[in-house]
Amino acid sequence: MKRVSLVFTLALAAGLSTNAATAQTLKTVKDRGLLSCGVSQGLPGFSSPDDKGNWTGIDVDVCRAVAAAIFDDPTKVKFVPLSAKDRFTALQSGEIDVLSRNTTWTLSRDTSLGANFTGVTYYDGQGFLVKKSLKVNSALELNSASVCVQTGTTTEQNLADYFKGNNMKYEVIAFGTADETVKAYESGRCDVFTSDVSQLYAERLKLSNPADHAVLPEVISKEPLGPMVRHGDDQWFDLVKWTLFAMVDAEELGVTQKNVGEMAKSDKPELKRAFGTDGNLGEQLGLTKDWFSRIVKAVGNYGESFDRNVGSGSKLGIARGLNQLWNKGGIQYAPPIR
Amino acid sequence: MSIEARPPPPQFAARLKRALGGRAGWSGFVVQILFVAALVWIFYEIVANARTNLENQHITAGFGFLKNTAGFDVSQSLIPYSGSETYTRVFFVGLLNTLLVSLIGIFFATLIGFLVALGRLSPNWLLSRISGGYVELVRNLPLLFQILFWYLAVLAALPGPRQSISLFGSFFLSNRGLIIPKPIGNPAFEPFVMAVAVAIAAAFLLWRYARRQLFQSGKLITIWPYVLGLLVGLPLVTALVFGAPVRFEFPELKGFNFAGGSRVIPGFVALTLALSTYTAAFIAEIVRAGILSVHKGQMEAGASLGLARGSVLRLIVIPQALRVILPPLTNQYLNLTKNSSLAVAIGYPDLVSVFAGTTLSQTGQAIEIIGITMGVYLLISLVTSAIMSFYGWRLGRSLEG
């Protein structure tokens, strides 16, 4: 990992990237014929390769949607697996065009890293995973516990804040990758594994006996996860931003992967605008008029992607919760396509 | 036709020409100038380009972040540290952890390396085969796997804290580490330390005196009873006068872990074990080569003087072998220090883990942090090789003098 970050750093320093800091990302991607997308090193539900080597997950779907909007082909994506600490350097150096890797939106990341968050794919929060045999029912009972955590995340600071705020002592053991962290937790090096709740559910599947472990009810932080792009290319920023909005709007408008063909013929004004039969909104983004239907055909709407990857249709079985649409009790809300 | 001797070129110009241009003369000088200019230009381009890129993307640059609050905790720290300290403090915590594991690793690697080398050269068939087997096994497996092996083996073998192995009810061994009573200084601590220091100094002077007597007049003076008396007696007297120098804080099982006491964390144990056994395999071969490089006549000469095999090795062979051993040994010390950066795999908070890891990702200032970290490793390496060069210089002087 050290070597990888060193390579990225040197690439950044040497300015080897041709497209860094230029407003040419869309053109570069088109010329290359591939979208380069930074993802995790394997987090089920968000971005992980299946047994045939195809990447799946809700973060992966965002990249596939962008590729579909540009090329009308969701397979034209090169996925670059990145560790938590290498991800920003990879984006800054131009190694990737989009970072879609369960990354928490914070003020400092939005400003000092030279990158912008384009939206929120998943509203998450930090929680704790413990062995059921410890008979702990609340995070407030964790005084003096040893806690395993993956380094290079917002998790370490939240953890320190939470234990300090509740006058509890703890020991933190930070590992380089998620796999090492989980292995140490499983071997008994620590009592608790802490991470974003969605990740806890995903990592729990990797344990030898998932039913012996429980996620505690406390959620100690706000972790809005979303894609990132580099500063300095507003067209590209808009394109990635509206790809995600299109997925959310599609769900709200009732457009699904199945009915997208019929809906495209609809007379409803908001559907006509979205599908480009009225106006040229897609072209304003630098895309084609049918960008909206390309996206939905490729990955479905936001709800479909959620269910397929992390929700009821997946092994993770996470409830929609905050990620439900705003008019159904959640906070997922996209500006109108108009 | 008579051949006239060409007048020799003026001394100064010739020397300058040789120094700057080598054998090629002035044309070589031009090539060198161009080469240096090209290097400077490339370096300038890199710096200027990086600066423009950073500015264009509005990425924060500079070292101001070092004064910001870190906000995260570290599991092992040699200096007082909490999450409300700055990133500078984090840097020093990581640096000290790296130095700690490196120094202890170097000590054990050298010890094991010498023993294995002597074992391999021993006339004892079994011992030499076992030593040979050790070298071949350990040096041919990737270090990262050995670190993970020791870590998981250490963890797997040990019980949880509630079932920990207890010794006298005050030492506890579990998968959270070895917990020992923590000494806390009483007011009598300072005189006690002074007494120990004085005793050691006096013992050293006594030893010097005895040696000089031996070399100058051949008198063998028995000094060990006096040394023992000094080392034990003096501190004991201060303890009697001022009271006990330390009291102990005993560990107690509270909640999930032990409260109180000092702790050696498993990550540290595993890393030290892996680094020292791995490097020892290389050191053993270096030492073996060094010993074999000493002419076997030296060994025979020593034996014919009636010295035992151990004494021949210690007094005659190894001092000569050290000249050969020292330079590659320095390499191994440097390797060990650099290899300690694999610590992040097992959660040991070394410099790379806490500074080039957590701090880097929290601040996002990759160039600065990677730069500082590389500078630090370079500095550690240069200091190590300076110390070894000094030792080699002194050794060379004493062998010749």
Image: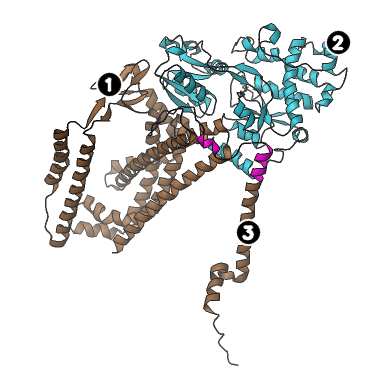
Chain colours: A cyan, B brown
- Residue type indicated by callout 1: Ser
Quadrant position of residue B300: bottom left
Give the residue number, with chain letter if any, for mark 3. Answer: B37
Q: Residue furthest top?
A: A328
Label 1: how many Cα within 10 Å (few below 14, some 14–19, many 20+): few
Give the residue number, with chain letter if any, for mark 2. Answer: A266
Q: Chain of mark 3?
A: B
Label ID, residue B166: 1
Q: How many marks?
A: 3
Q: Chain of mark 2?
A: A
- Label 3 element class: helix
> Residue B64 magenta-drawn?
yes
Residue B160 seen in this snapshot: no
- Label 1 element class: strand
Residue B266 seen in this snapshot: yes
Label 2: how many Cα within 10 Å (few below 14, some 14–19, many 20+): some
Q: Where residue B71 appears, x then y in whole percent? A: 49, 27
Q: CA distance from mark 3 to mark 2?
A: 69 Å
Q: Where residue B188 appears, x then y in whole percent? A: 21, 33
Look at the image and tell me in which quarter the C terminus of chain A lies: top right
- Residue type indicated by callout 2: Ser
- Residue type indicated by callout 3: Ala
Label 3: how many Cα within 10 Å (few below 14, some 14–19, many 20+): few
